[in-house]
């Protein structure tokens, strides 16, 4: 394809007026694949922003939609943004925070009602679909404000209720259409699996069962509101427990099958079910949080996250539902998984024992980390790191060349993953590195790298080339934006001098 054709196709996807990509019916990998073709041509590069590496005297202005075009308005959030901006000494960082923190509310939420109750779809950004993981993470930083803003509280309640509807459609699906009556994403329509109405993509990911529990528990702890936790929510939680039990594969069986005609092998599963495993008490996952297929079926960070989520569910089952049976089941499963992790998922490395990334129960291990969360790096952020010393050694491994998916170049350093290929750093890994850091130097360095790669567009992206931040994927990726906002707000309140 000629450069002109590349540029024409790229322009067709990009809306210069809104600054967003018109890719609302693509899977993530299809979008990344197409964008990768575009950025290899000179015509496409002329449409991409030029990176700015200086933090001094750079004024980007607001990149938010006009007030009338925003999906949701919260005066409490607007006041908070202003208060944080006043604490930030660097104007560029301040402007990035003001753009990024409200990005989910500005552009991705679709508040409504269903059967007279709040119902909120949350698209991931440039795709008109709602990932259970992303939607939970995208609204997470807004929970502290729910008591001060009734409309925001209802919006959050609506997210919980929509997730319940999705889980009851299919607990093996990772994402659902914002319009549950719409056909699935284009890239999913030839998948060899059981596709139900409303499902956008059916990649079974253990963390997709955990994130709705995390959001529900966080909402309850902040607000004390139990309205969302009705009979439908209970049924959804019972479905999660059942699915997790089945995916321990103690009888060697699973009802889940998935294959996709795709050039990239990480988009499909070996024999439709994945590589073999030996049942050891852990919960299998077919795909990673990146939507890439697991190499070995027991994804360790997802199982550690599941331990936390199951204990949260047990607490809510007792306190809200007064269902001691369900609480006991959740507690028992959490304990079983934790014991299995201790026995099988801690492996030797050059600097001592660390958490493996994936295992199979036969002794096979994968030593690496991926950029998405849950990851090994993100364990403390998700309250899923039961051993600080073990995490410290694992963290050092992750942020080093021993991790095959750690990259360092002239534009930055960080963790990437197979999803977008080699030499691509995910800003999300840099954000998580800073959020889990205990040293000011690490935090300051990461914020400088993040600012350098985001300043040209005013937003954070999915990934960028280690030597050129202008070569990026996903101009509209709300989770990364909101997470960046969470980091900057936390840092501004802890030590604003780190933002100078």
Image (cartoon, rainbow, N blue to C red):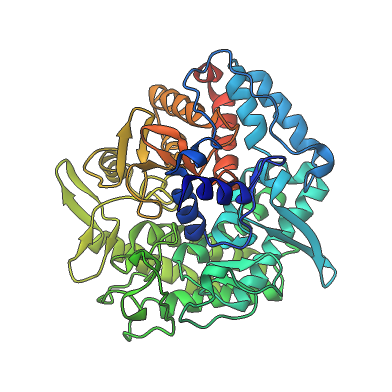
Tag count: 0
Of residues 294 and 208, the one nearer the viewer is 294
Q: Quadrant of residue 364?
A: bottom left
Outermost residue toward the left in this view: 350
* Residue 254, horizontal then vertical, whole percent: 39, 83
Q: Residue at x 55, y 64 (%)?
A: 313
Q: Quadrant of residue 475?
A: top right
Q: Residue at x 19, y 71 (%)?
A: 362
Outermost residue toward the top in this view: 57
* Residue 316, horizontal then vertical, whole percent: 60, 63
292 left or right, relative to 493:
left
* Residue 352, horizontal then vertical, whole percent: 17, 44
Of residues 409 and 295, the one nearer the viewer is 409
Q: Quadrant of residue 154?
A: bottom right
Q: Residue at x 40, y 30 (%)?
A: 438
Report if residue 431 is visible in the image.
Answer: no
């Amino acid at each position: 394809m000629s450069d002109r054709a590349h540029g024409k196709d790229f322009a067709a996807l990009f809306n210069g007026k809104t600054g967003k990509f018109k890719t609302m019916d693509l899977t993530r990998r299809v979008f990344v694949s197409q964008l990768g073709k575009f950025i290899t041509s000179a015509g496409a590069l002329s449409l991409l922003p030029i990176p700015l590496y200086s933090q001094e005297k750079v004024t980007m202005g607001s990149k938010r939609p006009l007030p009338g075009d925003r999906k949701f308005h919260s005066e409490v959030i607007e006041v908070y943004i202003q208060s944080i901006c006043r604490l930030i000494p660097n104007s560029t960082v301040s402007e990035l925070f003001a753009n990024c923190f409200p990005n989910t509310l500005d552009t991705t939420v679709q508040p409504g009602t269903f059967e007279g109750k709040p119902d909120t779809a949350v698209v991931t950004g440039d795709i008109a679909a709602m990932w259970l993981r992303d939607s939970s993470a995208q609204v997470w930083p807004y929970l502290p404000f729910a008591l001060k803003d009734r409309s925001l509280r209802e919006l959050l309640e609506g997210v919980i209720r929509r997730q319940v509807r999705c889980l009851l459609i299919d607990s093996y699906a990772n994402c659902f259409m914002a319009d549950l009556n719409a056909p699935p994403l284009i890239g999913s329509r030839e998948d060899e699996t059981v596709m139900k109405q409303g499902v956008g993509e059916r990649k079974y990911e253990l963390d997709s069962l955990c994130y709705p529990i995390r959001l529900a528990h966080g909402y309850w702890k902040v607000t004390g509101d139990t309205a969302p936790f009705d009979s439908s929510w209970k049924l959804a939680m019972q479905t999660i427990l059942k699915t997790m039990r089945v995916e321990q594969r103690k009888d060697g069986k699973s009802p889940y099958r998935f294959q996709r005609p795709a050039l990239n092998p990480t988009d499909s599963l070996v024999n439709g079910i994945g590589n073999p495993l030996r049942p050891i008490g852990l919960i299998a996952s077919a795909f990673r949080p990146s939507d890439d297929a697991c190499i070995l079926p027991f994804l360790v960070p997802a199982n550690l996250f599941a331990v936390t989520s199951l204990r949260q569910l047990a607490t809510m089952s007792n306190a809200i539902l007064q269902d001691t049976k369900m609480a006991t089941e959740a507690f028992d499963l959490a304990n079983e998984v934790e014991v299995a992790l201790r026995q099988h998922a801690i492996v030797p490395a050059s600097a001592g024992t660390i958490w493996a990334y994936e295992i199979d129960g036969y002794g096979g291990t994968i030593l690496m980390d991926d950029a998405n969360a849950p990851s090994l790096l993100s364990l403390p952020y998700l309250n899923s790191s039961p051993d600080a010393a073990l995490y410290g050694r694992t963290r050092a491994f992750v942020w080093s060349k021993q991790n095959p998916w750690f990259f360092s170049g002239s534009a930055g350093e960080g963790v990437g993953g197979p999803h977008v290929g080699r030499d691509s750093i995910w800003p999300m890994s840099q954000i998580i590195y800073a959020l889990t850091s205990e040293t000011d130097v690490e935090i300051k360095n990461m914020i400088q790298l993040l600012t350098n790669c985001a300043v040209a567009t005013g937003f954070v992206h999915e990934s960028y080339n280690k030597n050129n931040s202008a070569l990026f994927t996903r101009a509209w990726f709300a989770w990364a934006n909101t997470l960046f906002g969470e980091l900057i707000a936390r840092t501004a309140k802890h030590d604003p001098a780190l933002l100078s």
